[in-house]
Image (spheres, grey):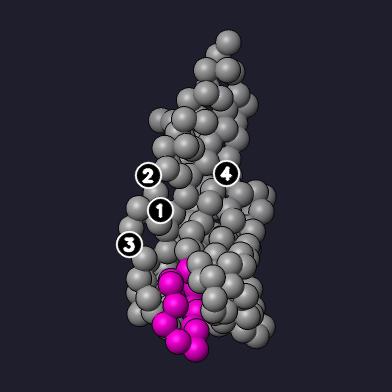
């Protein structure tokens, strides 16, 4: 009974998170390049003793243009202290219209810490609808599961 209740509550939370996401409600803007800061969490803390719960983190990049491609110039992952942990691209990646890419930080990779982030740079030949760039974190415990997301914020 408790498992059903927790599952129902988590499902409702996930629905509300997605349904009321700023990415879905905000007016779309046109740009030809951006650098975005995307918050991410390799783990979070739980309880009075700050028990650590590892998370699987997925960076999602979605080209929202129906007509134009975009180039992903760099995808970098930083830890809580701002130290570069890894760069995911050796060369730019061309995304076709409506294409999506993903980069995963595995559950057992907690090097990023509770204040990790991605820096994503993209460009296009002309102004396009800005891509949706967000980080989705998933975690589970003995009898619960949860998911949340963060939105990329332009920094340059």
Please give the label number shown on residue 138.
4
Considering every residue shown, the one lying at the far top of the view is 1
Distance from the alpha carbon under mark 1 to that under mark 2: 7 Å
Q: Quadrant of the N terminus?
A: top right
Is 120 colored magenta in this rendering? yes
Total count of labels: 4
Question: Please, is residue 29 above or below residue 11 in the view?
Answer: below
**Residue position marked by numbered label 3 in the rendering:** 27
Instruction: Report the mark closest to the observer, 2 or 4.
Output: 2
- Residue 130 locus on image (x, y percent): 43, 71
**Residue located 52% across and 17% down the image:** 5
- In the rendered image, the quadrant that contains the C terminus is bottom left
Q: Residues within 10 Å of mark 1 (few under 14, many from 20)?
A: few
Residues at marks 3 and 1, CA–CA distance in whole angstroms: 8 Å
Q: SS class of the residue under badge 2?
A: loop
Q: Is residue 111 magenta?
A: no
In the displayed structure, would residue 114 be above or below residue 11? Answer: below
Q: Is residue 47 above or below residue 38?
A: above
Q: Tell me the crowding category of disc 3: few under 14, some 14 to 19, or many 20 or more residues within 10 angstroms, Cα based.
A: few
For label 1, the SS is helix
Task: Tell me if 37 is positioned left or right of 57 in this view.
Answer: left
């Amino acid at each position: 009974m408790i498992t059903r209740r927790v599952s129902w509550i988590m499902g409702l939370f996930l629905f509300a998170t997605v349904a009321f996401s700023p990415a879905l409600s905000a007016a779309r803007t046109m740009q030809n390049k951006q650098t975005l800061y995307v918050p991410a969490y390799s783990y979070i803390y739980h309880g009075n003793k700050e028990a650590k719960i590892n998370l699987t983190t997925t960076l999602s990049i979605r080209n929202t243009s129906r007509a134009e491609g975009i180039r992903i110039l760099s995808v970098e992952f930083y830890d809580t202290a701002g130290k570069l942990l890894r760069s995911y691209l050796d060369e730019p990646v061309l995304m076709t219209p409506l294409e999506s890419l993903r980069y995963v930080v595995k559950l057992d990779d907690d090097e990023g810490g509770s204040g990790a982030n991605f820096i994503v740079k993209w460009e296009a030949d002309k102004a396009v609808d800005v891509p949706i760039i967000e980080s989705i974190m998933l975690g589970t415990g003995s009898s619960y599961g949860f998911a949340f997301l963060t939105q990329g914020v332009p920094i340059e």
